[in-house]
Image (tube, rainbow, N blue to C red):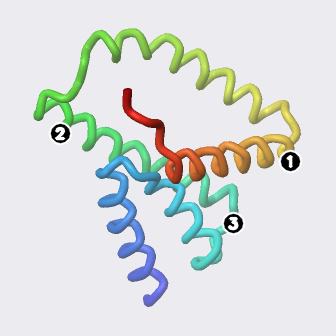
Amino acid sequence: MTQALIAAAVGFGTGIVSAFGIGGGTLLLLVMTLFLGVEGPVARCINLLYFLPTALGSLYYHKKNGYLKKEAIRSAILPGVALAVAGAVAAAFVDTQLLRKAFGLYLLWAGVSVLWPKKKK
């Protein structure tokens, strides 16, 4: 029972963090694997399922508040679908250790880029 309450609280908290554009999904993965004992592949599947309703909710509120640019959305659809397919193929055929290292480097780069933001011109 306690673990279910912790999981619900973490889901709620990461949902709020996600609404602000901060990597709530990454936090959710860390909590599930490090503190709740969920195996990595299961945690990743849960994270992907968690993303769908939060993304739809964000999309709804961004549209409602006029923050969406239709031109940008249209130009992102084709590359987004193509890269999603490429990522699925890579995940199926590329060595898992290589993908883990690449993702780890990406997370390090993302963290460092937050610490040293670009100067405004």
**SS for tag 3?**
loop
Q: Position of residue 74 (x, y in %)?
A: 35, 11
Q: Position of residue 99 (x, y in %)?
A: 78, 41
- Residue type pointed to by label 1: Gln
| Above or below, comparing residue 13 to residue 120 in the picture | below
**Identity of the residue furthest to the left in this view:** 65
| Above or below, comparing residue 13 to residue 83 in the picture | below
Q: Classify 10 Å Cα crowding around label 2: few (below 14), some (14-19), many (20 and above).
A: few
Between circles 3 and 2, the one closer to the viewer is 2
**SS for tag 1?**
helix
Residue, disc 3: 39
Q: Classify 10 Å Cα crowding around label 1: few (below 14), some (14-19), many (20 and above).
A: few
Q: Which mark sits nearer the N-terminus, 3 or 1?
A: 3
| Above or below, comparing residue 81 to residue 108 in the picture | above
Name which residue lies at 30% across and 10% down. 71
Q: Nearer the viewer, residue 101 or 44?
A: 101
Residue, disc 1: 97
Q: Position of residue 112 (x, y in %)?
A: 59, 50
- Residue type pointed to by label 2: Tyr
Name which residue lies at 47% across and 48% down. 49
Residue, disc 2: 61
Between circles 3 and 1, the one closer to the viewer is 1
* Quadrant of the snapshot with the N terminus: bottom left
- Residue type pointed to by label 3: Glu
